[in-house]
Amino acid sequence: MSMMSDFKAFAMKGNVIDLAVGFILGGAFGKIVSSLVGDVIMPPIGFILGKVDFTSLFISLSGTHYPSLAAAKAAGAPTIAYGVFINTVIDFLIVAFAMFILVQQIERLTRKPPPPSVPTIKQCPFCLSDIPIAATKCAHCTAELKAAA
């Protein structure tokens, strides 16, 4: 029974719940980015580069020519699907940049202000020279000063 209660305490900690929510949102965000790359970003780039569909770019290692990546995979031919790899790299770069921006903004919002500076010097009221804050006698004009509080 103790192990079950320990597990319940662990599972209900805020960090574990936050991690689970983050994991689920990250998966959904990954799907959005994949759709953004595959359906919005890459088609115009492929069009500009001569009507190239990046997901259909592949090299057949069997030496046989196949009309599409799907046909090569259906035939069981070994392939290097470098177009899909390009899409995946762009997916990663967008997710990494979005996470960078998110972490940067969170750090900016949670940054603590620097502690107030404590003065280490004061001015002598007689000769206006800078002297240590704890001084009881001015080193420049030898005037007697009030003791530091």
Image (tube, grey):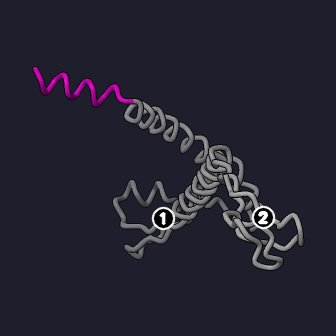
Q: What is the residue that sits farthest to the left in this orientation?
A: 1
Query: What residue is pinned by disc 1?
Result: 81
Image quarter where the N terminus lies is: top left
Query: What residue is pinned by disc 2?
Result: 122
Q: Residue at x 55, y 41 (%)?
A: 31
Please name the amino acid that badge 2 sits on. Answer: Lys
Magenta residue span: 1-13
From the image, give the main secondary structure of the stretch colored magenta: helix
Q: Mark 2 Cα within 10 Å, few/some/many (few <14, many 20+)? A: some
Mark with earlier residue (1, 2): 1
Residue 38 visible in the picture: no
Is 112 rendered above or below residue 133?
above
Q: Residue at x 51, y 41 (%)?
A: 26
Is 85 rendered above or below residue 12?
below
Please name the amino acid that badge 1 sits on. Answer: Ala
Is 12 a magenta residue?
yes
